[in-house]
Amino acid sequence: MADLPARVRRAAEDARLGEFRAVYRPRSADRRSRTWLVLLGLPGLVLLPFAVAFLLDGFGWASGLSLLLTAAYLGAAGRVLVREVLPGQSPTTVHLFENGVVLSSWRAVTPFAWDAVTELRVSGVRSAATGVATWHLTLSGRAGTEGEALIDGDVPGARELVETVSREVTERVLPTYLSRVEAGGKVRLGPFSVTRRGIAKDGEHVPWENVDRVEIEGGMVHVDRSDRPAGLTAIAAEVPNAVAFGELTRRLRGDARADGNGGRSVRSMNG
């Protein structure tokens, strides 16, 4: 961990996160922001002395035009500076370790051991122009800690990071969910409730024999029904541990089918 910032290294050691694996920085977004800052700020700074000189000579069309252009360039540059470049607004870096992750920004360093994560919320927004997804991760820990990170899809390994975090959290929360349902209890994941009888949302209950499939696609969680066209849907970001939800329904749907109910198998994830 010699190349890690000291505060990240200390946080990882204190949380016993084990061996360092990789770091994910939103370099693409940061580089674009800084490029726009230069492209917008430089013309504004060049025009500024001309605007001042024209104003000293009297207000006319030349001074008005130069003042308008200067304000437009510097205003746009200031917006980029405040919202995307200043340290307080800088995106979070994700440091992946063997037993968890550390989220670090200018303001804070927050470690999350896999065993201590209670909720993971994942959403992806795909750019219509480039087709590249930007991933939004939100982690919650047992001690009440929370952390968020935006990972640009242009960052190498971005999707693999999302899949790794989802897999590690799912492996740890799924046994608890299964035990609770098998004991006759209920698992609540966002707007969904899962029991031995089926899935419910907003007062609508779908028994397992009528659950056709469950999939995560296009930033949405879909529970399709075999008995009618309309199923249950929710925004993926509103469903904590959405991948675990998909795997839980697959297991329980499989048990129901083994008991003699028909229907197709459940898909827990769909690209």
Image (cartoon, rainbow, N blue to C red):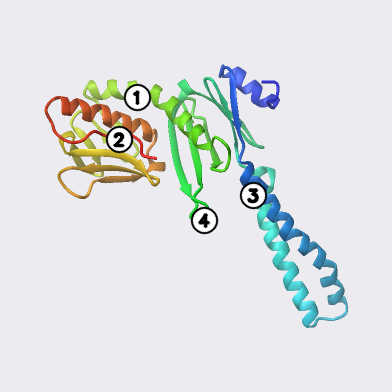
State the residue in front, 160 or 86.
160
Q: Residue at x 44, y 37 (%)?
A: 121
**Looking at the image, is 142 positioned above or below residue 188?**
above
Report which residue position mark 4 lands on. Answer: 129
Mark 4 → mark 1, Cα distance in angstroms: 37 Å
Question: Is residue 228 left or right of 140 when viewed as pictured?
Answer: left
Q: Which residue is mark 2?
A: 267
Mark 3 or mark 1: whose residue is earlier in sequence: 3
The secondary element bearing badge 3 is classed as helix
Q: CA distance from mark 2 to mark 1?
A: 16 Å
C-alpha gap between disc 3 and disc 2: 38 Å
**Residue 227, percent across and down?**
15, 44
- Which amino acid, mark 4? Ala
Q: Residue furthest left?
A: 260
Give the amino acid at mark 2: Arg
Which of disc 1 and disc 2 is earlier in sequence? 1
- Residue 43: percent from left, percent from top: 77, 63
> Marks 2 and 4, how far apart in space?
29 Å
Q: In the shown orientation, is residue 36 left or right of residue 92?
A: right
| Figure quadrant of residue 93 | top right
Q: Secondary structure at mark 1?
A: helix
Residue at position x 64%, y 41% in the image: 27
Say which label, 4 or 1, has the lower sequence index. 4
Name the residue beneath numbered marker 3: 84
Q: Is residue 179 above or below residue 270?
A: above
- Other-residue count near label 2 (Cα within 10 Å), few / some / many at <14 / 14–19 / ≥20: some
Figure quadrant of residue 6: top right
Residue where numbered disc 1 is placed: 174
Q: Amino acid at mark 1?
A: Leu
Asked if the residues shown at circle 4 and circle 1 are in contact, with their CB atoms under 8 angstroms apart, the answer is no
